[in-house]
Image (cartoon, rainbow, N blue to C red):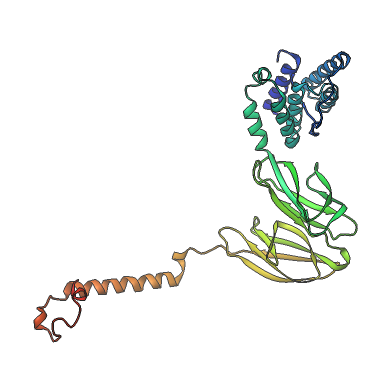
Amino acid sequence: MSKVCRAGLVLAVAIASGTCALTWSGRAEAAEPAATPTAEARAEAESLKKVGNEAMLQLDLAAALAAYEKALTLTPDDAALYYNVGRVHQAREDYPAALDAFEAFARRASPELKERVPQLDEILRDTKSKVGVIALSCRVEDASVRVQVSEKVSVTGCGPRAKLVRVSVLRAGATFEVQAVGDQFQPERVRAAPVGGGAPFPVKLALLLKAVSGTLHVETVPSGATVAVDGEARGNPPLDLSLSAGDHVVTATRDGYDAASVPVVVEAGKTRDVRIELQQKQPITSRWWFWAGVGVLVVGAATTVSILIIQPERDPEAGSIAPGTIPAPLLRF
C-alpha cells in the first residue's frame, strides 16, 4: 500500500478516535429516518469503532470494514463512520463505494465535523476522477444472463434499457472486458474504456442464440481503432462479437488512418477471424495532384504578372478597338 494510503488510514483512525474519526459499505441509505439509537447501541458502536480503528492501523482492511459497517447499523446517524468506510474502500481501490461513502459523509456531517476534514473537497474530486461508468444494454431482454464487467463487478439481467455500471478506473486508458455468461447465448466479449469522472461509455451486447449465430473475432493493426459492424459501433479490438449468421460488413477507423471495410460471412456455431490493417493517411503535400495543381497556379500567376508588367500602356485611340467598346474597368490593371 502506498504512503498516501497509509497516511489516509491513519487520519481516518485519528478522526474516529476523537483526536480527530469517520465509513460506508456502498449500500443505499434508509429512506425513512432511523429510530434514535439506545445508549447500549451507542456503547457497542463505539467499541466496534475502536476495533475498526485498530484493524486499520494493522492494515487489515476486511476486518476494519466489517467493524465499521456493523457499528453503522447500530448508529446510522454517526456521520464520522461514513468517512472511515470511504477510507477503507479507497485503500481497497473500490472507488465507486468510496465515493458513495464520502458523499454520504458530506451530506450528513455537521459543519464542525467537516472542519476536521479540511481536504474533503479534494478527496471528493480525486475519488470522482477514478470512477468510470459503463452504460450496459442488450438487444434482447433476459433476466437470467450474467454480464461480467470486471473481476470484481458483475450484473445479473440485461435488456434494451441501459444499466449504469460503475467501475474503478485506476489509470488513464484502462479498458474492461465486458462479456455475457449464459449457456444458451453465443459467447461475446467487448472492450470498454470509460473515462474516470467522464460520460458513460456505451456497451451493447447482442445476446444471440447459439443455434442461429456465430462469433466474429476482430483485430486491427494498429490497435486502438473503433470497430463497427453493419454501421453500428461495437467497441475497440480485440473483440469477440456475436452476430447472426449471414453477411456483414466490418469497418475500422482510427485517427490518422484511412478507414477500412471488409465483408465477412458468419456461419452459425462457428468463429470467424478478421484482421484489418489500417494505412496511415498521407499528408496532402505528398500527393502528386497537389503539387501539379500548385504548379499550374504558379505558372499561371507568373504568366499573368509578366503580361501585366510588359504590356505597354496605349493611347485608347491608337488601338484597333474603338474607345468605349470594352468597359473601362477591364482596361485598368
Q: Where residue 162 sits: x, y (%)? A: 75, 51
In the drawing, does residue 314 fall left or right of residue 92? left
Q: Quadrant of residue 43?
A: top right
Residue most toward the bottom? 320
Residue ID at (51%, 64%): 282
Left or right relative to 50: residue 255? left
275 or 313, nearer to the observer: 313
For the N terminus, the quadrant is top right
Q: Relative to residue 236, is residue 72 drawn left or right?
A: right
- Total marks shown come to 0
Q: Is residue 157 above or below residue 106?
A: below
User: Residue 306: x, y in percent?
Assistant: 22, 73
> In the rendering, at what x and y percent does residue 199 appear?
65, 46
Picture residue at 73% right of the left edge, 27% below the top: 87
Q: Quadrant of residue 253?
A: bottom right
In the rendered view, would you say 244 is above or below 94? below
Farthest residue to the right: give it. 183
State the image quarter where residue 114 is shown: top right
Residue 110 x/y as whole percent: 69, 20
Image quarter (top left, top right, bottom left or bottom right) of the C terminus: bottom left
Q: Nearer the viewer, residue 273 or 85?
A: 85
